[in-house]
Amino acid sequence: MNPTTRNLLYSLSLLPGILVVYGNLHSGTWYAAANLIFSLIVLGMIDWMSKPLLSDQHSGEHDTTPNLILGLHVPLQIACIASFVFAARNHIHADGDLFLCALSMGVYSGSGAIVVAHEFIHRKAKAAQWAGKFLLFTAGNFYFFIEHLRVHHKWVGTEKDSASAKRGQSLYGFFVSSGLGQIQSAWKLEKERLEKIGKSVFSWNNYMVRQFVYHFLFDTCMVLLAGWIALAAWFVQCILANFLLEYVNYIEHYGLSRSENERVTELHSWQSDLFVSRFFLVDLSRHADHHYYASKPFHTLQSYPKSPVLPAGYPSLILPALIPPLWRKIIHPILDRR
């Protein structure tokens, strides 16, 4: 595959968000659930049937096409939110279908907006950092920006990292322990940072405090514009988006461990080269290389022969991960062979 084709294929990551907007603006259960069905069922089936795509050719770190595609996710996420509020305010959907709209949007927020935010917060440019924080805000996340950069990448695979799933741990238990652990860690880091500069932890200088205030204002506007049902549906969207974030954390490092003195290598993250996981998730599935060289842009990530390989792709492993005995039956034999 040549670099131009590879870059253009990343535009597929925009399709789920487009389905969300279309579904929000058209009355009917099938429209409301469009992205829910597409991302979790259709893409999962395609992922199961596809073969690894091992192309490592890329067009250079500063190519405009991959960066443009990333940037388009920001207005697309705004369009998702605006169309949801418009639909709720104008009663385009019945209350039940409005929750389906929220679930569809939550799937895109968790598998699109947060994934792109992850890429942005690793960039040094202030505009990219702002875009990453904004996309995390739209998914109701107020800890990932701090914790991911300062803890997860430093301590991945060790006892100090809440976002590394231990062997035998269920996705449900991990969702609780990882979420709470990262929130506590992020708050502690902000407290320590502010104490060093003589600021109060409960001041506007605290990133988490600012996010909480922004969300309170946003939620108030949501109620005023669209009502309490819309706000409840919005909370469902946020919960699902962050559940998918933790699902991704779960499958990316499950059962892989290292000592605190051991350097992070390509052996400490699972990778996948399947088509859907690569191009709908902007190569997040090449996670081993991302942890090996965290500063590399997504379209330059490579596949490593020695890295542990997931038995399927990200969308197709959701069902097994939701059934702990099935997940262990699939993944533990691979771990045992390492």
Image (tube, rainbow, N blue to C red):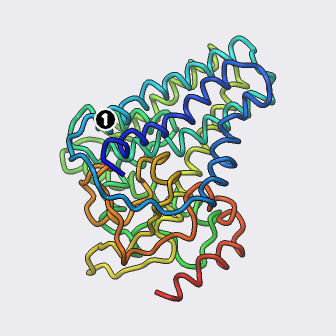
Tell whether 202 sits left or right of 174: left
Q: Position of residue 281 (x, y in %)?
A: 47, 48
Q: Residue furthest top?
A: 90
Q: Residue furthest bottom?
A: 337
Q: Position of residue 122 (x, y in %)?
A: 29, 48
Q: Nearer the viewer, residue 175 or 215?
A: 175
Residue type at the position of mark 1: Thr
What is the tally of numbered marks visible in this picture? 1
Circle 1 — which element? helix
Q: Nearer the viewer, residue 105 or 298?
A: 298
Q: Which residue is mark 1?
A: 65
- The part of the image, by quadrant, that contains residue 137 is top left
Q: Tell me what residue is drawn at x 62 percent, y 37 percent.
A: 237
Q: Position of residue 37 (x, y in %)?
A: 71, 42
On screen, residue 23 above or below 171:
above
Tell whether 183 sits left or right of 22: left
Q: Position of residue 272 (x, y in %)?
A: 47, 63
Q: Tell me what residue is drawn at x 44 percent, y 36 percent.
A: 11
Q: Nearer the viewer, residue 234 or 334?
A: 334
Q: Tell me what residue is drawn at x 50 percent, y 30 percent.
A: 215
Q: Residue furthest front?
A: 1
Q: Tell me what residue is drawn at x 60 percent, y 20 percent.
A: 222
Q: Nearer the viewer, residue 257 or 181?
A: 257
